[in-house]
Image (tube, coloured by chain):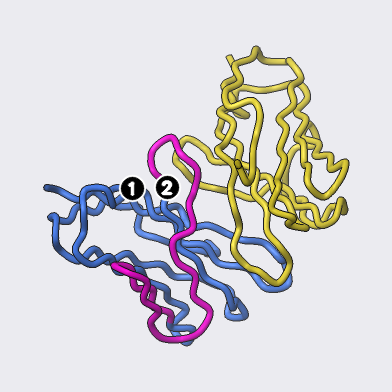
Chain colours: A blue, B yellow
Amino acid sequence: QKEVEQNSGPLSVPEGAIASLNCTYSDRGSQSFFWYRQYSGKSPELIMSIYSNGDKEDGRFTAQLNKASQYVSLLIRDSQPSDSATYLCAVVIQGAQKLVFGQGTRLTINP
Amino acid sequence: DTAVSQTPKYLVTQMGNDKSIKCEQNLGHDTMYWYKQDSKKFLKIMFSYNNKELIINETVPNRFSPKSPDKAHLNLHINSLELGDSAVYFCASSQTGDRGYTFGSGTRLTVV
């Protein structure tokens, strides 16, 4: 089982709609979860971090964490064409002290 | 000011050559990392150093040798380059207790 799993997509969403990205992880002891955005040819950019169960909102982005289900999600409201990118879910593996990434979900927002 | 800088940005070289990639961070972070991103965009950790001490050494061929002269610098030397080494290599840094990682702009290595 992969340590962090995402649906690789591509996910296509119309402009103005809500984009929903999902991620599951295998390490029950993990406490730190991140979403990175990566534009083509660029480096990963941290957009959200979440450490407690529930929702965390920052502007148009909402991260959701359910540790019992080992599930993290990212919602993007009022999607814009500039949101088109690959979104990477990342989890700190406790004990190993390393940040492990999922394979990324490619998101396209259609005008 | 660039927070995590890598050089060179692009590197094209022949099989069998030896090459180095340099990384510097000016964030005052105590931990630095090397990640490899393959053609399928999967980011995989290779090494991490905390205050010049090797912490993580994933299953990486010993042709890859990291070196950290101080906590602001982490270099990657690759011997006897192979076609399969072609990828984008990212340097990153973080501060213990602050759990976000900051990435450099990447080095695109092409082995021909």
Residue at (73% x, 51% y) in the render: B32
- Kindly indicate whether the residues beneath marks 2 and 1 are on one polypeptide chain: yes
Q: Earlier in the sequence, mark 2 or mark 1?
A: 2
Q: Is residue B63 magenta?
A: no
Which chain does the residue under circle 2 lie in?
A
| Residue A85, numbered label | 1
Left or right? Give the position of B54 relative to B13. right
Badge 1 element: strand
Question: Does the magenta run of residues contain A52?
Answer: yes
For the C terminus of chain B, the quadrant is top right
Seen in the image, is A18 located left or right of residue A40? left
Q: CA distance from mark 2 to mark 1?
A: 6 Å
- On what subunit does the disc labeled 1 rest? A
Disc 2 marks which amino acid?
A: Gln
Residue B7 sits in quarter: top right
Report the magenta residues as a range: A38-65
Identified by mark 1, the residue type is Ala
Mark 1 neighbour class, 10 Å CA radius: few under 14, some 14 to 19, many 20 or more: some
Tell me, for residue A38, which label it has, or none.
Answer: 2
Residue B80's spot in the image, x, y percent?
Answer: 76, 21
Whether residues under marks 2 and 1 lie with C-beta atoms below 8 angstroms apart, the answer is: yes
Task: Kindly state the secondary structure of the residue where label 2 is placed.
Answer: strand
Q: Is residue A63 above or below residue B78?
A: below
x, y percent for residue A106: 32, 49
Magenta stretch prevailing secondary structure: strand
Looking at the image, residue B39 sits to the left or right of residue B109; the answer is left
Looking at the image, residue A94 sits to the left or right of residue A11; the answer is right
